[in-house]
Image (tube, rainbow, N blue to C red):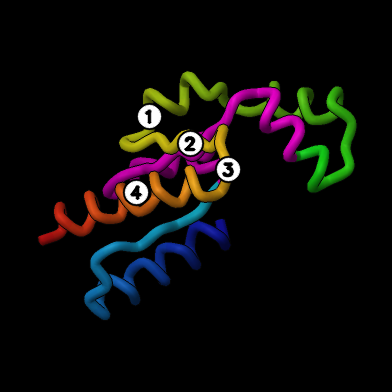
Amino acid sequence: PLVKERSRAIFAELSTAGVQIIVYESALLFETDRQHEMHGTILVTAGEAQRITRVQQRDSDTAVAVRARMQAQMSDDAKRHLADYVLDNNGNLQDLQRQVDTLVATLRQATR
């Protein structure tokens, strides 16, 4: 509840200040059903093997532990149906950056 309250206050402040595009990062946006509070949603996703490798590198977890966490979350297919935009993060950072740049241009165009 505190995160929800604080994020709503920040959104209001930014909107009042005239900010056109606000990006709110939330690993569990769809699981907490907060996507309805947003004007649009972006899902950044990668294949299962890629996600497992990245989490193992970041957290030093076993593949079994990572899979267990993933299975406790909403499936990517379900998230894809809820998202307005999907970015594929199977490649390198430059690949993702190109997708982000394209999306930002699209969003800027839509706010004009």
In this view, the mark in front (3 or 4): 3
Position above or below: 22 against 38: below
Q: Which residue is mark 2?
A: 30
What residue sits right under mark 1 in the picture? 82
At label 4, the amino acid type is: Glu
Amino acid type, callout 1? Leu
Find residue 22 and report its horizontal and vertical position in percent: 35, 62
Q: Earlier in the sequence, mark 1 or mark 2?
A: 2
Q: Residue at x 27, y 72 (%)?
A: 19
Q: CA distance from mark 4 to mark 1?
A: 13 Å
According to the image, label 4 marks what residue? 37
Q: Is residue 57 left or right of residue 43?
A: right
| Rendering coords of residue 75 (x, y %) | 56, 22
Residue 83, picture quadrant: top left
Residue closest to the eye, 78 or 36: 78
Residue interval drawn in magenta: 27-54
Q: Are marks 1 and 2 in contact (CB under 8 Å)?
A: yes
Q: Alpha carbon of mark 2 to alpha carbon of mark 3: how far?
A: 25 Å
Query: Callout 2: few (<14), some (14-19), or many (20+) C-alpha neighbours within 10 Å?
Result: some
Question: Label 4 crowding class (10 Å Cα cut-off): few <14, some 14-19, many 20+?
Answer: few
Measure how far apart labels 1 and 2 are at the Cα level: 8 Å
